[in-house]
Each structure stands twice: as structure tokens, then as C-alpha cells.
């Protein structure tokens, strides 16, 4: 679930990543197994920018990590490592994993996904704090 004003968002089976999972929309696949699908981000923010999504209907990281069965959580985590390996990012200088959760974090697609960012120096973790 994603928190939003006045309630909680339910899973929308028409979201773009659900459609990619059903094969209705193409993607540039990097890795796939029973638990997850990994593909390149269509609008890359770094030289290498991949997304890993679970093959199950969870709206956000909070939803996934609080609700998904253990074998799915472990399988998904392993799929991240396998994708990192496929991308050739296992050695220095490293990479960043990122999960935007809900509107304050700028989550656009309401199907849980993790970003893998690398191939260059990425810079600070967050923007400077605004206001007090
Ligand atoms: P977020 O803001 O964390 O929800 O990230 C959503 C990401 O999905 C963005 O980086 C988009 O560029 C990416 N995206 C949206 N549609 C597609 C698509 N059809 N194929 C690959 N990436 C996509």
C-alpha cells in the first residue's frame, strides 16, 4: 500500500509495470526468474539504470516488505543481486539501490520496484533539506 491523504491506495492492475509483467508492453529485459523481472529504465537517470520488480501485486516497498511471504522477499532480493551481476556492477566503484515509496519520495509507478543506479559517480543521496 502507498499512504495517501485520506486513505490507502489499492493495487491497480492496469499500472504500467503490471502490463509489462503480462507482456502487454515491451521492456528491455536484463534478468528474469520466478520471483522478479529486471529491465532497463526507459528514462535513465544514470549511465546504467535498471529496475527490478516482483512478480506479485505490491504497490510499494512498505506493502512488499510488510506483506510478502518470506520466499518472495528472499527471491526478490537474490534477483537484485543477479541483476547487479548481469550489469557488471559487482566490483568497485559500486552502485546505488533506491526505492521511492509514496508521493513524498516521488514514486510514479504504483507497482513496487527497486532502482539500480550505476556506471558513474552518482552524487549525494538526497537533495538539501528545504525549510525547517
Ligand atoms: P518511481 O519514480 O520510483 O516510481 O520510478 C518509476 C520509473 O519507471 C521511472 O524512472 C521511469 O522512467 C520508469 N518507467 C516508466 N515507464 C517505464 C517503462 N515502460 N519501461 C521502463 N521504465 C519505465
Image: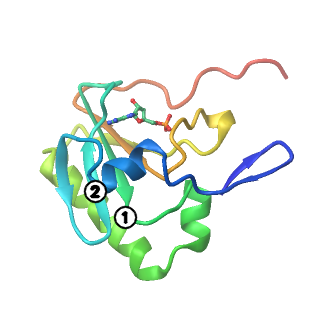
Q: Quadrant of the N terminus?
A: bottom right
**Secondary structure type for disc 2:** strand
Q: Is residue 108 left or right of residue 103?
A: left
Mark identifier at residue 79: none
Q: Is label 2 in contact with label 1 (beta carbons under 8 Å)?
A: yes
In the displayed structure, 59 sits above or below 100; it is below
Q: Is residue 9 left or right of residue 21?
A: right
**Secondary structure type for disc 1:** loop
Q: Residues within 10 Å of mark 2 (few under 14, many from 20)?
A: many
Find residue 45 and report its horizontal and vertical position in percent.
35, 24
Q: Is residue 35 left or right of residue 93?
A: right
In front of the other: 120 or 43:
43
In front of the other: 129 or 78:
78
Q: Residues within 10 Å of mark 1 (few under 14, many from 20)?
A: many
Q: Quadrant of residue 8?
A: bottom right
Label 2 sits on residue: 37
Colour setup of the view: rainbow
In front of the other: 25 or 127:
25
Question: Which residue corresponds to the image point at 54% horizontal and 35% vertical from the top-left?
Answer: 108
* Dot 1 beta carbon under 8 Å from ligand 1: no
In front of the other: 93 or 105:
105
Q: Quadrant of ligand 1?
A: top left
Q: Quadrant of residue 22?
A: bottom left
Q: Quadrant of the C terminus?
A: top right
Residues at marks 2 and 1, CA–CA distance in whole angstroms: 7 Å
Q: Is residue 98 left or right of residue 96?
A: right
Find residue 96 and report its horizontal and vertical position in percent.
37, 41
Mark identifier at residue 55: 1
Find residue 84 and report its horizontal and vertical position in percent.
22, 51
Question: Which residue corresponds to the image point at 55% horizontal and 66% vertical from the top-left?
Answer: 65
Which is more N-terminal, label 1 or label 2? Answer: 2
Find residue 26 and report its horizontal and vertical position in percent.
23, 41
Amino acid at each position: 500500500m502507498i499512504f495517501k491523504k485520506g486513505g490507502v491506495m489499492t493495487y491497480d492492475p492496469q499500472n504500467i509495470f503490471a502490463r509489462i509483467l503480462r507482456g502487454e508492453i515491451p521492456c528491455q529485459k536484463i534478468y528474469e526468474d520466478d520471483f522478479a523481472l529486471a529491465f532497463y529504465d526507459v528514462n535513465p537517470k544514470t549511465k546504467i539504470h535498471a529496475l527490478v520488480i516482483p512478480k506479485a501485486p505490491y504497490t510499494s516497498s512498505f506493502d512488499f516488505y510488510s506483506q510478502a511471504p518470506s520466499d518472495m522477499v528472499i527471491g526478490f532480493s537474490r534477483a537484485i543481486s543477479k541483476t547487479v551481476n548481469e550489469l557488471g556492477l559487482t566490483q568497485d566503484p559500486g552502485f546505488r539501490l533506491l526505492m521511492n515509496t509514496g508521493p513524498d519520495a516521488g514514486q510514479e509507478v504504483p507497482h513496487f520496484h527497486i532502482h539500480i543506479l550505476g556506471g558513474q559517480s552518482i552524487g549525494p543521496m538526497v537533495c538539501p533539506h528545504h525549510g525547517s
